[in-house]
Image (tube, rainbow, N blue to C red):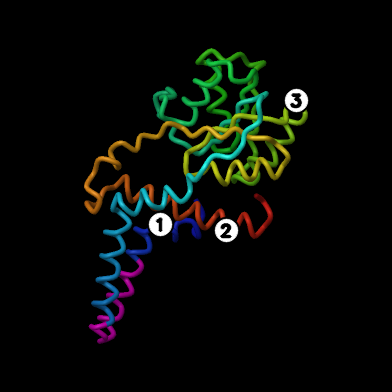
Amino acid sequence: MDYASRLLHPAIQSLLLGLLALLFIGLRHPRKGLALGALAMGWIWLASSPVLALALRGGLVGASQPSPSRVEAIVVLGGGKLPRDGTMPEDTRAGTALRLWHEARAPLLLVSGRDQANELARRFRRAGVPADDLRIEGSSANTHENARDSAAILRANGVDAVVLVSSDIHLRRAAGCFRREGIDVVPVAAREDRDGLLRAPAWLPRRDALTLTARALHEYVAGWIYRRRGWM
């Protein structure tokens, strides 16, 4: 994660506000310092609340779009949870893609992203996916490159319609990038467990709510940048 992305995390933002508050207090501006300190505490509390996290998520998930009647490959994007024990639980991107392959949704399975592609391919092979059915795109560093480099591999294999697997809040941007490359997309979200957040008190701070808020803020900013650059 680069430094700009880190600045989008509410915990980092609150920490910087707190440091600025201490600076103002040290410079004998206690009112400004206390105001900034209160702002830092209020923001980390709000960002950690399920009500904000789920609201931000809702703005990213959106309504589904028309999908092609057939697909020729399953594409799973790296960047998701990957347990160290070598498994692929059903609530992960990899586990969702494996389930779709077992359901014979498409004959090919493509893994994309230099952070996880090779490891995902190894796990899929161990799970029974034949090497001939696997394609690896292991050079891309972001969603735009995922789509661009995967589209080249897909076209080389005569594929122009795919099931695209990623996290729910990432799918809108990812699908937009693949469609921009001329690939028809059926988006499928990994079965990430949100039950804890949905059942939790709306204003009680939670670590998983803070994580979701941070990821959602990243998606909003990234989506704006991608639209400005014509990537989706």
Q: How far across and down, in percent of the image, does residue 224 sit?
A: 57, 58
Q: Report the Cα–Cα distance between label 2 and label 1.
A: 17 Å
Name the residue located 49 percent from the left edge and 34 percent from the top edge.
189
Instruction: Please tell me whether mark 2 or mark 1 is closer to you in this view.
Output: 2
Instruction: Please tell me whether mark 1 or mark 3 is closer to you in this view.
Output: 3
Q: Is residue 50 above or below residue 117?
A: below
119 and 96: which one is in front? 96
Name the residue located 49 percent from the left edge and 27 percent from the top edge.
94
Q: Which mark is residue 224?
A: 2
Q: How far across and down, in percent of the image, does residue 212 sit?
A: 38, 47
* Secondary-structure class at tag 2: helix
Q: Main secondary structure of the magenta part?
A: helix
* Secondary-structure class at tag 1: loop
Mark 3 neighbour class, 10 Å CA radius: few under 14, some 14 to 19, many 20 or more:
few
Q: Which mark is residue 9?
A: 1
Q: Is residue 163 above or below residue 115?
A: above
Q: Magenta segment range?
A: 16-31
Q: How far across and down, in percent of the image, does residue 16 sit?
A: 36, 67
Mark 2 neighbour class, 10 Å CA radius: few under 14, some 14 to 19, many 20 or more:
few
Q: Report the Cα–Cα distance between label 1 and label 3.
A: 39 Å
